[in-house]
Amino acid sequence: MDSAATATSVQIGPAFSAASAYQVVSVAAWVIFILWALYTLIAAYHWLRYGHRSPIAIPALVAHVIVSALLALYAISGFIAT
Amino acid sequence: MEEFELEEGENVILSLRKHWFVFFIELLPFALIAWVPTLFPALASGFAAASPEALAALGAFSGANPWFRLFLGMWWLVLWILAFNTFTQYFLNHWVFTNKRIVNIHQHGFFDRHVSSFFLIRVQDVSTDVNGLFATLLHYGTIRVQTAGADTEHDFEMAGVPDPTRLRDLIMKEVAGLHDSHPGVGV
């Protein structure tokens, strides 16, 4: 009984790791993207509502989106198939 | 102005934010915290000579490891969001000086904005405080606007303002102008 269970876990182990790594990264990336998008929407609302039509508002928001995208790409770059 | 309406005969003289160095000091912790994980690969190579086993364990902390890159990217993304939040607060917090009042617009956080006015006619004294090496070299400091009487509850303080001496002179000039045009009002 014990040896059968051990054999099963050894067989499943590597396959499970490969699949779960992809799933963990996918789920984590989506969760972080949703949180980031919510934050960005709220920040954009405040910038545009209270920024008094400042010329800095749009460039600041664009810079925020670009830097965030670059950092997110760097984070998942190890998991993207080349 | 979205936050307040100008009265008749009132005009904006100056709109002011904190000194850029105050903002820089607020950003500095984020830069330092962002830098910490980049020390891990250097630490790993440092341990190599002492212990090959330690090197094997610390080998995970390298840019070649996708999980470490994921951690690093997420770490920097969170720090970037916090730093951008600091910038947003720095930008949205400001003081507006009119010929009748000082308006303090303070963004405590998202959806938490406080706008208060301090009428210049009530001003009795304006004092400045420039304290420290950087404040002295870069010309920023604190201004305290005091009302008449012993009640300090309604006194007004602006910390980290650029060129506080010039600002004090500007406020006092406007106060003197108000007292000249409204003799017997205020103090």
Image: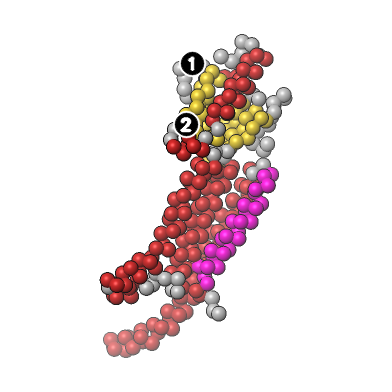
Apparent side of residue B151 relative to residue B10 in the rendered image (left or right): left
Query: Nearer the observer, disc 1 or disc 2?
Result: 2
Q: Which residue corresponds to the image point at 65% horizontal and 53% vertical from the top-left? A: A59
Judge whether B15 appears above or below B99 on screen: below
Which mark, by number, is residue B149?
Answer: 1
What is the magenta range?
A: A53-77
State the residue position of label 2.
Answer: B130
Mark 1 and mark 2 in contact? Answer it, CB < 8 Å. Answer: no
Q: Is residue B83 magenta?
A: no
Judge whether A63 appears above or below B55 on screen: above
| Label 2 residue SS | loop
Q: Which residue corresponds to the image point at 50% horizontal and 75% vertical from the top-left? A: A79
Q: Earlier in the sequence, mark 1 or mark 2?
A: 2
**Quarter-wise, where is residue B55 in the image?**
bottom left
Percent of width and height locating residue B84: 54, 52
Quarter of the image for the C terminus of chain B: give it. top right
**Main SS of residues in magenta:** helix
Q: Which residue corresponds to the image point at 64% horizontal and 24% vertical from the top-left? A: B100
Q: How dense is the environment of label 2, judged by Cα within 10 Å: few (below 14), some, or many (20 and up)?
A: many
| Label 1 residue SS | loop
Apparent side of residue B134 relative to residue B47 in the rendered image (left or right): right
C-alpha distance separating marks 1 and 2: 25 Å
Amino acid under disc 2? Val
Asked whether residue A66 appears in the rendered view, the answer is yes
Judge whether B18 appears above or below A2 on screen: above
Amino acid under disc 1? Gly
How many numbered marks does the figure carry? 2
Judge whether B87 appears above or below B102 on screen: below
